[in-house]
Image (cartoon, rainbow, N blue to C red):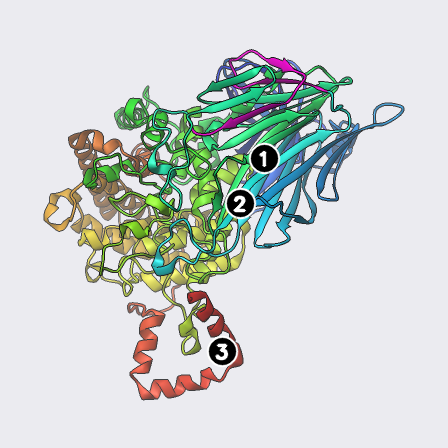
Amino acid sequence: MTLKSTTSRPRNAQSLVLIPAVLQTRGTAARNVPIVAGLCLPKGRLTDTAFGHVEGFDKDTPVQMDVLNRWNDGSVRWILASFVAPEISAESRELGVVAAEQTESSILQRSHQKPGADRLTTVKLVGSQIHLCTRNLETDLPTEHTLKLAVRISDAAGEELSLQFDGIREDVRGAVRQVFVAAARLQSLPAVTLQFRLTHWVSTGLLQVETRIRNSQRARHAGGLWDLGDAGSFLFRHLEIAVHSDDIPASAQTHWKAERDQISRSTSGPVFLRQFSSGDRFWNSPNHVTASGANPVDTRGYEAVCDTGTLRGYRAEPTVAASGDGASMAMAIPEFWQNFPGSVGAAMGALEFGMFPELPGVIHELQGGEQKTQSFWISAGTECCHLQNLDWVCDTPRLMQSPASIEAASVLPWFCSKAASENHAGPAAERFARYLKSATSDRFSLEFRRATIDEFGWRNFGDIPADHEQTHYAGHNTIVSHYNNQFDMIFGAILQLNAATNLQWFDWLDPLARHVMDIDIYHTSSDRAAFNGGLFWHTDHYVDARSSTHRTYSRHNQKPGQPYGGGPGCEHNYTTGLLHYHFLTGSQEARESVLTLADWVIRMDDGRSTVFGLLDDGPTGAASATVFEDFHGPGRGAGNSINALLDGWLLTGSEHYLAKLEELIRRCVHPSQNPDDMHLLDAEGHWSYTVFLNSLGRYLLAKRDAELFDPMYRYARDVMQTYGRWMAENEGRTLDHPERLQYPTEAWAAQDFRKANVLRIAATCEDDIAQAEKMRAKSDQISESAWADFAAFGESSLTARCLSIVMTEGQRNIFHRTSATDPLPPCDAICPETSWTMFVPQKQRVKRMLRSPTSLLKASVRVLNINRILQTWDALKKQM
């Protein structure tokens, strides 16, 4: 079946859009599987939608449509499609998702054909429990079934802690899927909060429970060091969620299996399974050390205990169920062994998931500003329980939109749908595809990479080992170094997923995105503004992470008498992968994370939030500095800040994001600027100016798509011309000058791909045809040299850092070289006459003020402002 994205208008004048997609599976057949997928549409194709159906199954399959994002004209850009696949075969299946325009007639029609309308679902709090009640309205005597969730958590001493629930809200109300969110906090420590996100699939009785625990206290990080054992950590013994139903008696039969391929076991007594470690070959890696430096992981794999004996193994993917009196309830937990330690059990008709299980001698530590999210699935009904009905939980199928229709929608800048193909895509695309295959196979496969340092456990799983750090590491072991999504590996993997519809890319990006949102983002508002809500850097270069976990700086790596330490900063801020993860999955956590990181940019640059604000409350410069505190020209610091603000604007349309990013553009670049004055050929200090220009190009595309051809569009376009002409004359292969580099590694070749792409973007802004051709020629020269350098470096070019860069820049390079690129058109807007001088950061301005009696006298008037005094006092407390 070949499907193309089409729009038709039937007799009732209701517009229909057919979106071609493929349902990718992992070889596991199943029935009635819930599917959620983000789908994109070209501008103007669909005004609004709330329902549709899937073509390609043997039976009519209704789809719930929730709009995630819109174009500037109000039409739908991204929708979230939710449906229950009636059958999943072992092989992939081509489908068509038909979205219907929501009109008055369609709303009336839908009210009579609403799937699940015969069921009413409500969620309420009863004491300290969450009750999900489902009423079946289709019978003469409506029946009601209730699932009850009870949460147990204890402190480090083993004392039970009480929860204070703050209420329940309904996030999504649809015919196919409903979402309820319950929020709670510890009565004795309100900074520790829990969130329970309940997704109920109306027609199937399936319930997904996503539990998040967050410690929103700040870390104290004395001296800029972030080790475990910090005073801001929350220490606890266990966190467990029990599920029971009044329909199932305490005498229920228990059914269970520890691994998918095992046969089901049954018992009349309790079952308890604990996963102690990953069970992999390096299961007791130093990656798992605690604050004391000890490794608490002392048992390989899992252990299951029941009345018939004990079962041991390496990797559990458990399913447990209870059945009796004509009712049954089953539980399955995705990524169970990967997020060790964990437990699952069944007793007295109840099922229990130990997200943080009670283990002998183990105290769990949640760092200040850290959170963890895990989920489990419940299948409840009147039928006899079949454990294999939940096998899909660990091998979830994915609906993927066809690459050609994604490219046609123009939602991804510089996206080429053929870039990941080894066949019939041209030699450049085939070379790129061969690189990706080498960088994700054998010793460089995702599984092998994780295994080298046992990148498993609840805090580690999802991250990618920073294997490029091994080259200059002085130790004899495999370096324990965490990559923390540098250069936005999430987005690079999303590009490959969209181009190839291969599930291996979802395996890269999905756990990584959730890890970044939980562990790498600093979830507090109680620290200094420059850190609150920020993103932690990767592990410091060429040293073991030791007890700093994923927070860069450890006291064990500090050299006596030398300055060390730090915290989140603008040069490590990556949001675009999370933005598109939200669009692909509907993740609300991803949406909130993008806005958190965009807001972080604004907060870190707000001079009122620092101790210097008493004398000077102007911008700090923290959002625009790169490498040097006094450099505020083009660099990755400002480039990442602009990109994050742009994502905030694209997500919300809020003008304050756009205003701030345009302020940063004006601060750092100017059409009349002389790039020679920026010392851009000093690669060690200024290689990242291309990151800034890349963000500037994306900003221009967004303004063009929004049809905002205003003075700032003209300003940015003129800047691209200025820098493009300079690059065509002066730039080249970075490794031609190894004497300028501290370490002439393969990373410089990878960065050259971005340099080549920036030249291509600049060419689309160029009005002079000869100049544009000169830029394209230099771009081709640089990218070909980069590929040659990659070949010379051999396997070093397959490490995490290079792969992360090339997944995005290599893909875009194929687009620029094989696709007809629309120019960024000139506009008639007039830029005001301005000049440019280097921005002076707040700290330097205050130092100058203190040396000038006149300036100090003027500032003394401001000191009398009570609001300034209070703000300064608050900032001073947060510095402590």
The residue lying toward the viewer, choosing from 272 and 259, is 272
Q: Nearer the viewer, mark 2 or mark 3?
A: 2
Q: Which residue is denoted by mark 2 in the rendering?
A: 236
**Label 1 SS:** strand
x 46%, y 82%: residue:
862
Q: Amino acid at mark 3?
A: Ile
The residue lying toward the viewer, choosing from 403 and 253, is 253
Would you say residue 578 is visible in this rendering?
yes
Residue 88 against residue 720 in the figure, above or below: above
Q: Amino acid at mark 1?
A: Leu
Measure the C-alpha gap from mark 2 to mark 3.
39 Å
Toward which corner of the image does residue 286 lie, by quadrant? top left
Q: Quadrant of the C terminus?
A: bottom left
Residue 313: x and y, percent?
46, 19
Residue 229: x and y, percent?
42, 50
- Crowd rating for badge 2 (residues with CA inside 10 Å; few <14, some 14–19, many 20+): many
Magenta stretch: residue 534 in it? Answer: no
Would you say residue 35 is visible in this rendering?
no
The residue lying toward the viewer, choosing from 156 and 557, is 156
Q: Which residue is denoted by mark 3 in the rendering?
A: 869
Magenta stretch: residue 274 in it? Answer: yes
Q: Is residue 470 left or right of residue 511?
A: left
Q: Is residue 159 left or right of residue 828?
A: right
Q: Earlier in the sequence, mark 1 or mark 3?
A: 1
Q: Which residue is denoted by mark 1 in the rendering?
A: 80
